[in-house]
Image (tube, grey):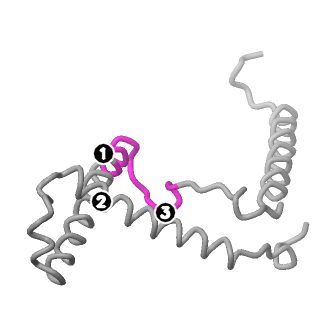
Amino acid sequence: MPKNEYDPYLNTAKRSLQTQQDKKRKKDFISNHQKSKSFFQKDIDLNNYINLSHRFGQLLVISLIITIPYTIGTLFFLLISLTNYKNYQNLEVNSYLLKWTIGYEIIASILLFMIFKSAIYFKNNDETQIKT
């Protein structure tokens, strides 16, 4: 018999096995996603929020880590200079690392506050999940 000949029994068996595997995968997926997890056990995947290639995503994250805290630190020092210019003149704020560190601390405190707030308002919605 040639290898390329159509065999309906073999195709039926393959289809049946594939259907069983699909059902098992679907069941596992549903059971894994319907388990109620506490707030700190939730998985966070940035690919769900940002759809970028791996290399471009890494470059973007590195550049954002460098520029955003520096910009916020600079704005913080500008805010200080607007409120009290004499105190601002006494500070040596020409240092990149000083501005970056201040900006980093501001961002970190905001993020911690947001995490704390979402942890307080988090609740498991077991009754709203679909049971199969």
* Residue ID for mark 1: 59
Q: Which badge, 3 or 1, is on the more N-terminal residue?
A: 3
From mark 2 to mark 1, how far is it between C-alphas?
A: 16 Å
Numbered-mark total: 3
* Residue ID for mark 3: 49
Q: Which segment is the magenta one? A: 46-61
User: Quick check: is 51 in the magenta stretch?
Assistant: yes
Residues at marks 3 and 2 touching, judged by CB atoms closer than 8 Å: no
Q: Which badge, 2 or 1, is on the more N-terminal residue?
A: 1
The residue closer to the viewer here, 44 or 75, is 75
Residue 69 is tagged as 2
Label 2 neighbour load within 10 Å: few <14, some 14-19, many 20+: many
Q: Quadrant of residue 74?
A: bottom left
Name the amino acid type tagged 3.
Tyr
Provide the major secondary structure of the magenta segment.
helix
Residue at image point 87% right, 78% down: 127
